[in-house]
Structure formats: C-alpha cells, structure tokens
Image (tube, helix red, strand yellow):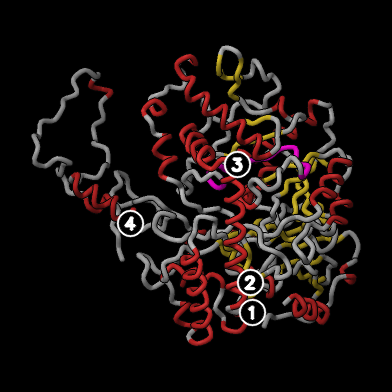
C-alpha cells in the first residue's frame, strides 16, 4: 500500500477553504527587505484533504485503544478517559506557570498530593516531579548520587555497577553522568551473581543501578543481601522503576534498600504512552539524597502551597525542564492514583502478575519454552523461540511480524539480550481473560504453522499497510526527510 | 552450522585470534557470533596506538537486534584497524574470518595459547546451544 505524504496531495493554488472568500491578508507593516521572496514549501490542499490524510494515518496505527499491546518492559495499559478529562479542566489548561502562586493553589495542591502519594508508593521521603521521561529520571537519579559523593569530598568513586540484565538506558545514564560502567553477570536462575558483585565493589563504587523485578521477568530474591554489599562498600542503590507495575502496593523500593527511585508515570500510573512522549520520570529519594533533588518541588506551609527552588534547596542538581516537567501528564497520574487508592494499587500489581503468570502457563502448555520455567513470572515473562528457530528457521522476529497480521501488537523482541530468540511479553492488568486466551491461541497457531509452512511466516506481515521492512537499510541509511520539492538541487543520492 | 576455522584461537566471548608471522595478532568475531547478531549495521573500532588489557571492551558491533562489545582477547597495542568496515560493516557477516577482521594487535606477550583451540570452541558453542 502506498500512503502518500501530504505534499503529494498538493496542487498549486489550492487552499484550505476553497468555497469561502479568497481575500488574502496583506502584510504591509513589515519592512520590505524583511519579507521572504519565495513562498515556503507548504502543502496546498483543502481542509477536507488534510482531515482525511491525518485520520487515515491515525487508523494505520496500532495503539492501546485499538489492539492488545503486550510490549514487554513498556507497561502498555489502558489510559482511563476520566484521567484525561479531569486533567483537561479549563482551570488546569488555562493556568500559566508564571502566574502568581496564590492563583494556582489548586494545581499546586494536586502536585503536592501527587508527591505525597509517590512517597507512600515508594517508601521514600522526598519526590521531585520535574524529569520529563524515564531517561531523564535516570539521569536525575545518578546525578544526585554523584552530587552526594561529591558533597562528602568522596571523588574517588568513579564506577556504577550495572547487571547484564539491565535496561540499555542504565549504562548509558551512568556514562552520561561521567561514570565508568562495570557489568556483572546474572546466574542461571535470573538473579544477580552476588559473588561477582562482591568482587566488583570497592572504594571506587559510586553505586549500582538495578531493576527489580529484573528485565528477565523475575524478582531479585536476595535484594536485601545485595543492598548490604553495596552499602557496605559505600555505594548507593538506584532503582529503575520501569517494572514498578509488578510490585505496586506490595513491596516498597525503600524497604529493599534503595536510595533513589525513578518511576515512569507513563507506565505504572497509566498516562498516555508512546509516540515519543510526553512522558514523566519522577524521582523519589531517601534522606541522604533529598537535598539534591531537581527543582522546582512543591512545598506546603501555613500560607498554602508554593514552589521550592534553588533558594530552599541550594544543593539541588538544578532544573531539568522549564517549570514543572510535563504538568498535564502529572495531573493525569494524579487522577489515576486518586481513583485507585492504596487498595486499587494492590489490585493493579496483583492482576498484572496474575495475567502474566496465566499467559505464561497457557503458552507453556501450548509447547512454548519459558526462559525461566522454575521461576514465577513478575508482571512480564520471557518466551525463548530458540528451539523453534533451530528446527524450522522461523525466528522471534517472524513470530512478531505474524502477530501483526493476527491483530496483536508484537511483544518486545530480542530483549533482554541474555535470552536468545526471545519475546518479552507483558499483558498488564487491564486485559480481559478472553483477550489473553485469544493472544495465546494466535501464538500457538503461528508455532504450528512454523512447522508446516515456514515460508508463509517469512512473508509476514501480509495484511499490514507496509510489508516486511528492510531494517538493515533503515539503520544504515535512515532518511526520514521528504525530498520531493526542494528549492536547491537534491544532493542526497 | 557455524564455521569454526582450524589453526585459530578463540575466546568464550566469540572473538577469534590469528597469530601472524611477524608476531602481531589479528582479531575478529566468529561466524557463530555474526550469525547470532544478524546483519551488522555499524562497527566501532579502537584507535591505532591504543593499549589494551586482556578482556578490555575495545570495539562495538551493532546489528538491528543488538549492540555488543568486543573484548581484547590478549593484552597489547592496536597497530591497525579494518577501515573497510566503516562503509561496509556487513563484511563481518560475509567473511568473519577474512575481509571482516576487526583489528590487529602487537601483543605484550604471546599468551594467545591460553585461549581455546578450534575443537574446544566448537564444543563451547555446541554446549551454549
């Protein structure tokens, strides 16, 4: 299928409102030498064409509103309409961040309460809502660890330890913060190798970055011992909250020994997710790191709510965003948390893990190989297609493409890297039993087809707007510009 | 089945090492490794003149599936790198033991003999599944 870009619909002289008047506003109050001579290369199309074009594009998408989306590690749960609606109340939308705080006590009260709820959900003592994405939350967390060591004159701590099962962003974050990364292995049951950790820590240890449950879809069982090893060496523990959905209301990161946590509100707390944002990667810290929180933070005193800035937090790592992060996203998370309450949060993690374990058991019964069959799944689990790939040549990527034809967004493929030919499957708590059964049946059908007609699966997807893409060429020669109408000759071959 | 060439030495991280007549060693990744990674889209090589300790991460091979570190199989100084990989990273896929070599080291001591031989490496990848 060829879906034209909007420029291809363009015809010279066509206007948005063809049947309304054609009077063109004249610009006569700007100096002539400041006016452009050549018109900008904008598409000339009717309003109806624009509406159809973008509506059609939106219909080509997979989204949580249209399809089951079991993308492991991403927590693609339903985003309740109520959260959207309440966060878009005119009082919120019309609030200017530079307006006087007396005029914005309502929104500040919501943000303050959100901080308090996140403290309760993590067991930490202070929260900053400013990071605008998970990666920025990670950056804030490790920057605070660095500021902490520096404030004590402890400049020798140069190394952040990262288990090999970590999200790829963890070593990237440590590097961005100026640290060297030391990787430690995972044992055959999916736990961090504590002997390797003992050998890796020392006077150069700044901290460790850990996700629990890990990206392998299992809970790190010896987390307290692990925390003891790192703390005894003088390092701090960073909790990557990507997998918080599994433990919400069950165990507190603070109780596991962590010093700093980031949480993706766009995962666990159900704000819209995807398309590059807007996201929110709030950070929560214990007493040690509280002085270093990014600002502003919302404070409360006898006069009401107000911003706390560098004046109140002089050791702050600084500002990560204009004003208060993605305030509209924070409000959506606030509404979601208020709707759930503490009991609802426990139900979220309960059903998230129940759904994952149900699906894993169902797939095992259909002949699929779980990567860690002796372990209970967290909110997600890994299926390895190594055996099928060896016997039929049909790979995890072929399964992923075939799922698209069957109306399911593919799970995460080839991550974590530790498990060959893997699918990382996260159903979330918002899917029905029927949806889970349908997905399991689709995967079982693909597996059966692999042994009967592998070629058919190599040709998948057949029913999507685009067929199999050349991902190698996309990586090598990525070019997302439209070159159809350039004023200067196109030098790009 | 992956190709394992006799006469080379191998690591458990899937690098191969070939000792040349002049005492330098050529390093690449194995046929098994390139199969696992899939078609490469990018290769990052160490600068010439860099000194490496054995086991040090010194190069990166990136495919559409994954980016993996390549480790120095032996300690030494980088004396040459395969410039052709800059434009054609898939040479590693086409010819992992030939045109797809990564870099050449002047080793500190000839300790390549403690690495796996072809038979031991064949057993290793078979056990890995």
Cα distance, mark 1 to mark 3? 43 Å
Q: Are marks 3 and 2 in contact (CB under 8 Å)?
A: no
Q: Main secondary structure of the magenta part?
A: loop
Image vertical order of residue A115 relative to residue A393, above or below: above
Q: Are marks 2 and 1 in contact (CB under 8 Å)?
A: yes
Label 4 vs label 3, nearer the camera: 3
**Regarding mark 4 in the picture, which secondary structure is present there?**
helix
Quadrant containing the C terminus of chain A is: bottom left
Q: Residue at x 56, y 32 (%)?
A: A114
Q: Residues within 10 Å of mark 1 (few under 14, many from 20)?
A: some
Indicate the chain on which mark 4 is placed.
Answer: A
Label 1 vs label 3, nearer the camera: 3
Q: Residue A342 has which mark?
A: 3
Circles 3 and 2 on the same chain: yes
Label 3 vs label 2, nearer the camera: 3
Query: Residue beneath label 1, please?
Result: A387
Looking at this view, is B126 or A116 the one in front?
A116
């Amino acid at each position: 299928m060829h879906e034209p870009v909007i420029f291809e619909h363009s015809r010279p002289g066509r206007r948005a409102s063809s049947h309304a008047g054609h009077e063109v506003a004249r610009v006569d109050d700007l100096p002539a030498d400041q006016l452009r001579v050549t018109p900008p290369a904008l598409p000339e199309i009717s309003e109806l064409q624009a509406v159809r074009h973008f509506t059609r594009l939106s219909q080509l998408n997979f989204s949580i509103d249209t399809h089951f989306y079991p993308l492991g590690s991403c927590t693609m749960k339903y985003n309740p309409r109520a959260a959207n609606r309440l966060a878009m109340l005119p009082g919120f939308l019309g609030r200017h961040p530079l307006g006087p705080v007396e005029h914005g006590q309502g929104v500040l009260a919501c943000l303050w309460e959100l901080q308090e709820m996140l403290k309760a959900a993590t067991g930490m003592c202070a929260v900053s809502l400013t990071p605008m994405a998970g990666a920025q939350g990670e950056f804030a967390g490790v920057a605070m660890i660095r500021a902490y060591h520096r404030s004590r004159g402890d400049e020798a701590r140069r190394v952040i330890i990262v288990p090999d099962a970590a999200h790829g962003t963890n070593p990237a974050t440590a590097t961005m913060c100026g640290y060297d990364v030391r990787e430690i292995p995972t044992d055959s049951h999916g736990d961090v190798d504590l002997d390797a950790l003992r050998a890796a820590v020392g006077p150069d240890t700044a901290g460790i970055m850990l996700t629990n449950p890990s990206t392998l879809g299992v809970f790190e069982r010896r987390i307290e011992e692990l925390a003891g090893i790192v703390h005894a060496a003088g390092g701090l523990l960073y909790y990557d909250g990507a997998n918080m959905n599994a433990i919400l209301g069950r165990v507190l990161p603070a109780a596991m020994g962590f010093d700093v946590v980031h949480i993706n509100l766009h995962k666990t707390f159900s704000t819209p997710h995807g398309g590059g944002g807007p996201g929110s990667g709030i950070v929560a810290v214990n007493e040690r790191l509280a002085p270093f929180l990014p600002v502003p933070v919302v404070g409360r005193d006898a006069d009401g709510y107000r911003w706390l800035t560098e004046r109140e937090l002089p050791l702050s790592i600084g500002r990560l965003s204009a004003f208060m992060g993605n305030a509209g996203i924070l409000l959506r998370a606030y509404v979601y948390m208020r709707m759930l309450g503490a009991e609802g949060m426990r139900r979220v993690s309960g059903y998230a893990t129940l759904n994952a374990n149900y699906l894993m058991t169902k797939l095992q019964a259909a002949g699929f190989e779980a990567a860690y069959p002796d372990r209970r799944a967290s909110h997600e689990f890994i299926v390895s297609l190594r055996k099928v790939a060896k016997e039929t040549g049909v790979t995890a990527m072929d399964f992923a493409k075939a799922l698209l034809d069957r109306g399911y967004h593919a799970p995460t493929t080839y991550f974590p890297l530790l498990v060959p030919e893997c699918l990382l499957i996260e159903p979330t708590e918002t899917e029905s039993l029927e949806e889970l059964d349908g997905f399991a049946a689709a995967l079982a059908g693909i597996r059966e087809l692999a042994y009967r007609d592998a070629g058919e699966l190599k040709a998948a997807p057949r029913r999507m707007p685009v067929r199999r893409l050349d991902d190698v060429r996309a990586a090598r020669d990525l070019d997302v510009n439209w070159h159809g109408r350039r004023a200067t000759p196109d030098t790009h071959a | 089945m992956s190709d394992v060439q006799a006469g080379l030495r191998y690591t458990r991280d899937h690098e191969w090492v070939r000792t040349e007549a002049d005492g330098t060693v050529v390093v690449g990744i194995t046929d098994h490794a390139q199969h696992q990674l899939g078609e490469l889209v990018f290769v990052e090589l160490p600068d010439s003149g860099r000194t490496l300790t054995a086991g040090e991460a010194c190069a990166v091979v990136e495919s559409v599936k994954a980016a993996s570190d390549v480790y120095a199989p032996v300690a030494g100084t980088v004396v040459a790198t395969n410039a052709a990989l800059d434009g054609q990273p898939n040479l590693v896929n086409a010819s992992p033991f030939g045109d797809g070599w990564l870099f050449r080291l002047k080793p500190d001591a000839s300790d390549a003999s403690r690495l796996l031989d072809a038979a031991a490496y064949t057993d290793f990848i078979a056990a890995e599944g």
